Image (tube, grey):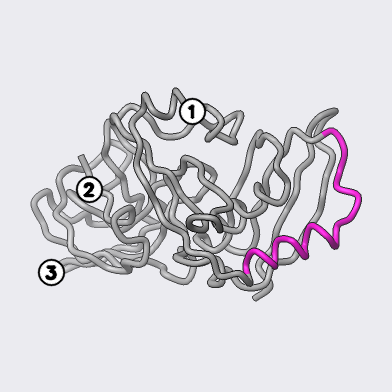
Amino acid sequence: MTRPLFREDAYMRSAKGVVTSHTPEGGIVLDQTVFYATGGGQPGDSGRISWPGGSMSIATTVKGEGDDIVLVPAEPGAMPPVGTQVNQELDWDRRHRHMRVHTALHLLSVVLPFPVSGGSIGAEKGRLDFDMPEAPEDRDAVAEALNDLVDRDLPVTEDWITDDELRANPGLVKTMSVMPPMGQGKVRLVRIGQGEDQIDLQPCGGTHVARTGEIGRLVLGKIEKKGRQNRRVSVLLDG
């Protein structure tokens, strides 16, 4: 099992780790990592690891067997042996942009309160697919509502509930195609706002900014028809 340091502190940029195994495909498993593994529409982290006598660029990070997190080297090279302590350095700019986009998509699901059938996160933009028969009539109003939530600088926090509590409250799940990470006995909820100012609460395993103001200005991108009931809505970071 790899300890997911990114879940304890999404702002951690570097950390030590000990190599516990190599995968048959040439990946590296550590006892703990700051690298987020691809999941929930969010790409895996990239960066670099180094150890006495060597270093290696990490192209992406994926989930392995069980609770393992696998660092995927950018190119073949000498691997740090099992038992070696390595230093991990995130490509922080890329990760932070993923965090900004991910939180922005949660805001989009507030402004457009329809069931979500898919989504994707990038370093420049993200998109959600909505079970929404008609496109919004007023694009400017959608963009204004999004940026108003950004400007309110609402806190983004987390809570945990049990799997059974989530099953008893299915309304918390907005996604139709991606089920929240379950099976560990508890599920992480991401909350935007507090008390009377709470605007969103939903299961999510990804990384987020600490406050909505950190997202920065958003630009509403394309609204595409992807089926009789499906509309794809893109949001871009403006800088």
Q: Quadrant of residue 165?
A: top left
Q: Which residues are magenta?
A: 133-150
Marked residue nearer the N-terminal end (3 or 2): 2
Look at mark 2 in the image and give the residue it sits on: 3
Q: Residues within 10 Å of mark 1 (few under 14, many from 20)?
A: few
Vertical order, 37 against 23 (above or below)? below
Vertical order, 105 against 228 (above or below)? below
Q: CA distance from mark 3 to mark 2?
A: 23 Å
Left/right of residue 99 with respect to residue 54 in the rendered view: right
Q: Residue at x 51, y 45 (%)?
A: 201
Marked residue nearer the N-terminal end (1 or 3): 3
Image location (x, y in percent) of residue 145 = 74, 61
Residue type at the position of mark 1 = Asn
Q: Quadrant of residue 186?
A: top left
Residue farthest toward the bottom in the current orientation of the protein: 239
Which is more foreground, mark 2 or mark 1? 1
Q: Residue at x 21, y 52 (%)?
A: 32
Residue type at the position of mark 3 = Pro
